[in-house]
Image (cartoon, coloured by chain):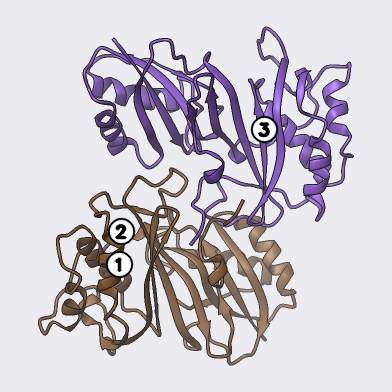
Chain colours: A brown, B purple
Amino acid sequence: VRRLRLVLEYDGTRFCGFQRQPEGPSIQACIEDELSRVCGHPVTVVAAGRTDAGVHALGQVLHLDTEGRIAPDRLLLAVNTRLAPRLVIRRAEETEPEFHARFSAASRTYHYWMAREWPSPFLGRYVLHAPRLRADAAERMRAALDGLSGTHDFGAFCAAGAQVHTTVRTVQRAALVECGGLLRLELTADGFLHSMVRIITGLLLEIGSGAREPEALVQARDAPSRGRAAMTAPAHGLFLARVAYRDGFVGGPDDAGDRPWPEGR
Amino acid sequence: VRRLRLVLEYDGTRFCGFQRQPEGPSIQACIEDELSRVCGHPVTVVAAGRTDAGVHALGQVLHLDTEGRIAPDRLLLAVNTRLAPRLVIRRAEETEPEFHARFSAASRTYHYWMAREWPSPFLGRYVLHAPRLRADAAERMRAALDGLSGTHDFGAFCAAGAQVHTTVRTVQRAALVECGGLLRLELTADGFLHSMVRIITGLLLEIGSGAREPEALVQARDAPSRGRAAMTAPAHGLFLARVAYRDGFVGGPDDAGDRPWPEGR
């Protein structure tokens, strides 16, 4: 038995999310069906992050065990030929049997894309149009993000009904980047609660539009009363951008390629 | 009666082309329906280029006449609110009654995007995956394009059955640009024959993969025997990028913004 790890890009638009579900096409079912065909036996994958319906990935990491002898680059070719372009394996390699896509991860990075102007039709499925953002929205959002990082109870930013052992997480980095007329929120943490990035984005949108002040983000995080702190932003602006592992492995583009479309001319 | 001109971006994926047709949703029907609603009377538009099914636009230019009093920026807002993101009006303004979207155009620029590697899922609908391209494909294609420009009979690059007065056109610029791991063909001419860019692209793909030599492009153009010179490349890599007018007006992004996705971080 060999353990393989894969780095996956996908457009989440027409999927019901990563996880296999009775109704609707999931990323998991889609990739497991192809991998099983290629490996010649039923394959189950484990993912770094179970993205919700409509959420995209630039650097989703999976592991799987196979008894087959197929070379990783042949597997990549066979799967991509059937599933590209909506789902593309970017990297496939043999790994230590101890490697675990979910539990060996040291950090995950999510991006959320927003724009005050109508985004181009070619980005409309990947960028939230937020016409209420003020001209100084980026500054206001940056001020709000200033106090977010560190180890805190982020329970206020967790979807209702989520079953978790603890709501304490460590946010390692929180930044807002302006890129070609768009805004990109970048959050890196050891782990994220269910809908955490989208609830933080919802609050940032209110701050950026002037409905709330920049202090509201940290105040919501630390408020004694529980309950959702803000509207959950739509799924289509969200990307699982990168997963970094304790052994140094990084799934997803490094800083230089941090966008789903190419740079330069 | 006032004449307005509009600059339009659209994702052609799910349209049957620009021109209104009995079956299938066309760009023209889509925008005319909204404009008629907003203007309060039936509106007919004239376009710079009638893009085929699946072809995208960054800088399609339209004109229309209206008896209504709506301000151009209000019209833009009303239409975009209904049609964005798959169709976005980038610019709307009143113009001279002599302006004609089709006949006043001095040049049109089309882009065709290709990639040897699987393009990202977020570009898969806009970039042709061409795995047979050799590592030196860009050089070979550039050598082929060298002799293409100028005033020539381009009849060899015209779809069968097209009804045209003359197949002589003036190609003002033919270039191949490498951009973030992708290749972009850029063609500017006073006008294009039906499928001309896609047939030239088809031939360039053969040249880039080594099936034909760079000289084959100019040879095909000048061959005495008529008939299609190559396979027609698929529609989804093609963009109507820009239309330039004799009065100096340019629809579509200028050189600095020549891609449908944003640059920079």
Q: CA distance from mark 3 to mark 1?
A: 42 Å
Residue under the image location 14 percent in, 60 percent down? A211
> Which of the 4 image quarters holds residue A62?
bottom right
Q: Which mark is residue A198?
A: 1
Q: Amino acid at mark 1?
A: Arg
Q: Which mark is residue A90?
A: none
Q: Amino acid at mark 2?
A: Pro
The quarter of the rendered structure image containing the N terminus of chain B is top left
Q: Is residue B65 above or below residue A58?
A: above
**Furthest residue in direction bottom, as rendered:** A98
Residue under the image location 35 percent in, 40 percent down? B84
Tags 1 and 2 touching, CB below 8 Å: yes
The image shows residue A12 at horizontal and vertical percentages of 44, 59
Closer to the observer: label 2 or label 3? 3
> Which of the 4 image quarters holds residue A142?
bottom left
Callout 1: SS:
helix
> A254 or A9: nearer the eye?
A254
Q: Which one is earlier in the sequence, the residue at label 1 or at label 2?
A: 1
Callout 3: SS:
strand
Q: CA distance from mark 2 to mark 3?
A: 39 Å
Return the chain for callout 3.
B
Task: Establish whether labels 3 and 1 are both on one chain.
Answer: no
> A228 or B179: nearer the eye?
B179
**Which residue is label 2 attached to?**
A234
The image shows residue A88 at horizontal and vertical percentages of 59, 61
**Furthest residue in direction front, as rendered:** B248
Would residue A228 be found to the left or right of residue B169 on screen? left
Return the chain for callout 2.
A
Q: Amino acid at mark 3?
A: Leu
Closer to the observer: label 3 or label 1? 3
**Which residue is label 3 attached to?**
B187
